[in-house]
Amino acid sequence: MNYWKMFYYSDIGILQCNHVSGQNHNAFMKTFSRSGNIFWPVQNVVRSAESGWYQQPDTMKRNASEVQVVHKGDTLCFELGHGVMISKACFESIGSIPHMVAEDLCTSVEALSRGWNIKFASQIYGNEAFPVTLTALVVRAQKFCGANLEFLRVYHKRLFHSKALSFYQKLDILSFTLSAPIGAFQYLSLILTGVVFPVMHLPMISQFDFLIPAMICYASQALVDTIFQLMRGVKIWSVVLYEIQSAIVYGSYYFVLVMTTIFSLLKRPAKFVVTPKTHGKITWAYALHAHYRSIIFSVITIVVCWHFSDSPWILLTFLPGCIGFLFELQANFQTKETKATNALLRRESKLALVGDRNYRLDWRA
């Protein structure tokens, strides 16, 4: 199939292709890449199908006032930065890629406001690696958080006054962009529960029930992953272990998300921090040094909450920030499949230097 024909026969300006985290060479990447491998084919298919359809009668004069909504949508399909094809006409009407950290979201808004449709091609795959260590994952979360808040600060008036977007589409883009910094607001809610309300002598905060919504927030990070893993026949104990690991890893983001959100609210420009792609031998000392700020931040929070709160249960919600660094060490380990693949690659690399190895390699060997 010639996929460029999808541009020729329609008013599609951007085609977002599918994504698979298949280049995972350590245990950390292997464990947490499941989230992306479920997010891409599930959420993006729904977004593409329910995003509605725009039409621009005059392709030479594309601006927001001329956009005609043929069918109102309930969600938006975004360009997500990689695995993207943009038509020449769409790119020329935009003029240039916006110079912002969230350039993918900004490009999506620029295209939509000019009447271009964005659709998802589930049958076209790109293969990338999941963040190589916990440090790399935290760096990516920091970038997403700052970039999304900067995007909202710059584009919120244009988005919420747009007549081309339905109410549900505006609500969708708000929830989508707040999915990264939401951890900072969750932390604020826990501080209210563990410090502010006790100081105000509200007895309700001493109840064990306040631990339940916090645990639900942690569990919700991997809820969709859990459902699809169970549907695929993954053993229940493996799914439960994944849920616990995800809750600890994502719960250890508090320091980064809170600091990034504060800086963003102070209108400090977001930074495009390159996610580390490689790592050496990770020691305990390295792991502690890489996450010492998160550990100190969490310990101080626990001490303050312990002083003011009558309920020790709330303190459990801050433990991930103290022990999350342990997952940094997981990057030292490899699965049996990864070891076999790496051994095969080394062998074939040596053979390629001594002769003609022009044949198809079976990686399952």
Image: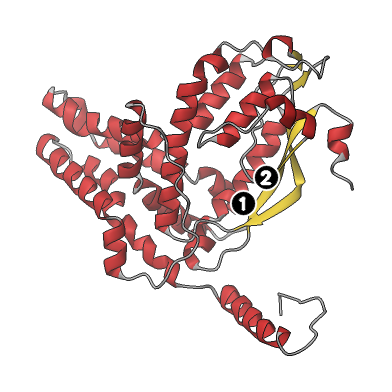
Residue drawn at the location 32% of the way across and 37% of the way down:
258
Give above or below for 280 relative to 308. Answer: below
Q: Residue at x 57, y 64 (%)?
A: 24
Looking at the rendered structure, the secondary structure element under dot 2 is helix
Is residue 216 or residue 272 the one in the foreground? 272
Q: Split into 4 quadrants, where in the image is the C terminus?
A: bottom right
Tell me the residue at 76%/22% (across/down): 53
Task: Give the amino acid type for the residue marked by disc 1 in the picture.
Answer: Asn
Q: Is residue 169 above or below residue 189?
A: above
Residue indicated by mark 2: 41
201 with respect to 357 (left or right): left
Q: Nearer the viewer, residue 203 or 131?
A: 131
Who is closer to the viewer here, 337 or 155? 155
- Residue 265 falls left or right of residue 237: left
Report x, y in % for residue 109: 62, 25
Name of the residue lying farthest toward the bottom? 354
Q: Mark 1 near mark 2, Cβ–Cβ under 8 Å?
A: yes
Residue 178, visible in the rendered structure: no
Within 10 Å of the Cα at label 1, are there few (<14), some (14-19), or many (20+) other Cα atoms? Answer: some
Q: Amino acid at mark 2?
A: Pro
Percent across and percent down for residue 331 are: 44, 67
The x and y percentages for residue 16 are 70, 40
